[in-house]
Amino acid sequence: MADQQITNTQLDNGLTVLIEHMPAVQSAAFTMLVPAGSTNDPAGQNGTASILSEMISRGAGDRDTRELSSTLDNLGVQRSEAAGMVHMSFSGATIADKLSEVLQIYGDIILRPQLPEHEFEASRASVAQTLTAMQDEPRQKMLLELRKRCYDAPFGLPTDGTLEDLPNISHASVCGHYERCFRPNDAILSIAGNVDANEICDTIAEHFGGWSSKDVAPPERTPCSGESEHVIHDSAQTHIGIAYKSVPYRDKDYYNAWAAVSLLSGGMSSRLFTEVREKRGLCYAISASLNTLREDARVMCYAGTTNERAQETLDVTIQELRRLQEGITQNELDRCRVRAKSSLIMQQESTIARAGSIARDWFHLGRVQTLQEVSDRVDGLTVDSILSHVRNYPPQDFTIVTLGPEQLDVSAATETT
C-alpha cells in the first residue's frame, strides 16, 4: 500500500486536527466529532441531541437556512450531520481546492449556529417521524431493547431519542445542550484528500482557534440489567436478538474478535447464513456484528423467522455461536482476509471513508492506524489466534430479546450440555 502522510496537530483550545494527504485523488473530505452526543441528553429528554443535529444547519453566522444550503450546494458539498452516542458528527466531501471555503462555513455552523426558535417544531417533528417509522419496524424495535439491556445507561439509550421524551424537550433544552456540550477540547477534526496540510491547518486555526474550551463532567453510568426479555408483538414473524460480551476496538485482541464475527456473518458463505438459513431454512434473515464502545463491546446477533420456527431458530443459532470454539478452517480465514483487503482498497479510494476512519481511530486509540498497519494486522491473523480468542471470550452469558406473539424458552436454548 502507498505511503501515508498523516499530520497531527492540536490547537491551543484542545481541538485535535488530523490530516492525511492523498495525492492520487481530486477530492477532500472531513469528519468533525463534537462531544455532544445522546449520552449528554438530560434525564427525561432523550432526543435533545437528535433535535439539535436537525436544527444546527438551519442557519449559521449571517446566513439563514436557504442561504446556507445554497452556499454549500454551490461548493458541491456532499454532507451530513447526525447525533451519535458520544459525539455529534459533521461530515462532508468536495473538490479538494474548495475545502478551505467549506471549513470556513462549518466554522459558522459549529461555533455560531442560529438555532432559530421558529425551526424548533419542524426539527422535533422530523425526529418524531423517524422514531414513529422505527416503531413500525419490529427488527429495529427489538434491537433497541437489546442494546438497552446489554449496555449501561446512558450508553444503551437510543441515539435518536424516544417518542415518550420528545414532548419534554423545548427550544431552550436544545440551546442549553449546545451551550453545555459544544467545545473544542475532546473534539476531533479529521481530513483526508489532496490537500496541503500546512495551508489547511492555517485555515482551521483561523476559523476554529477562537472556540472556547469547557469542562464537562462525564455522564453518570447506571448498570444495565443484562436480563433477557420478551416483547409481545402480534405478527406472523418473530424477531430474535442475542448479545454477548466481546473486546472493544482499542483491545489488542480486537482483530481476532472481528475475524471471529466475520466467520459467523461475513457473506453468504458465513456460518450463520449457511447453517441456519440455507441448510435448515429456519429464517429469512440472520446476521452478527461486533459493536464497540470505547471501553466495552458486544457481539450482537439478529434472526428474523416465522413464529412456528422461532424456538428452533434460537436454539440452532446459539449452537452455531458456540460451535465456533470447536474449530476454524484455513479456507474460512482466507475468505475473511479477502473481505478485509477489499474494504481497505475501497478506503484508499474514498476520502470520506478515510476521514471517518481517522477520526474513529483517534477517539478509540489516541492515534491513527495506517492502512498498511491494518493490512499487516489482518495478515497476522491465524486459525490458532482466532480460536484462542473465541475460547478466551466464549459466547456465553447471553442477553436475549425476542419480539413476537409467543415467548420463547431462552433457558433451554442457552443451557450447556
Image (cartoon, rainbow, N blue to C red):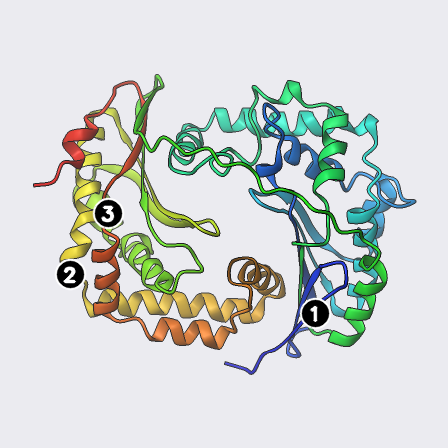
Could you tell me the amino acid type at mark 2?
Answer: Gly
Q: From the top left corner, tell me how far across and down residue 237 is, in percent.
A: 31, 26
Element under label 2? Answer: loop
User: With 154 as the anchor, is 174 left or right in this view?
Assistant: right
Residue at x-position 30% and y-position 29%: 228
Q: Which residue is mark 1?
A: 9
User: With 291 as the anchor, is 63 left or right in this view?
Assistant: right
Q: Which mark is residue 327?
A: 2
Task: Please rate how many residues cluster around mark 1, counting C-alpha atoms within 10 Å: few if below 14, some from 14 to 19, many from 20.
Answer: some
Q: Which mark is residue 96?
A: none
Residue at the outermost bottom position: 3
Mark sitting earlier along the chain (1/2): 1
Pick the front one: 247 or 240: 247
Could you tell me the amino acid type at mark 1?
Answer: Thr
Task: Please rate how many residues cluster around mark 2, counting C-alpha atoms within 10 Å: few if below 14, some from 14 to 19, many from 20.
Answer: few
Disc number lying in front (1 or 2): 1
Q: Which residue is mark 3?
A: 395
Residue at x-position 74% and y-position 32%: 176
Q: From the top left corner, tell me how far across and down residue 392 is, in percent.
A: 23, 57
Mark sitting earlier along the chain (3/2): 2
Element under label 3? Answer: loop
User: With 113 as the anchor, is 131 left or right in this view?
Assistant: left
34 over 227 or under it: above or below:
below
349 over 116 or under it: above or below:
below
Residue at the outermost right position: 62
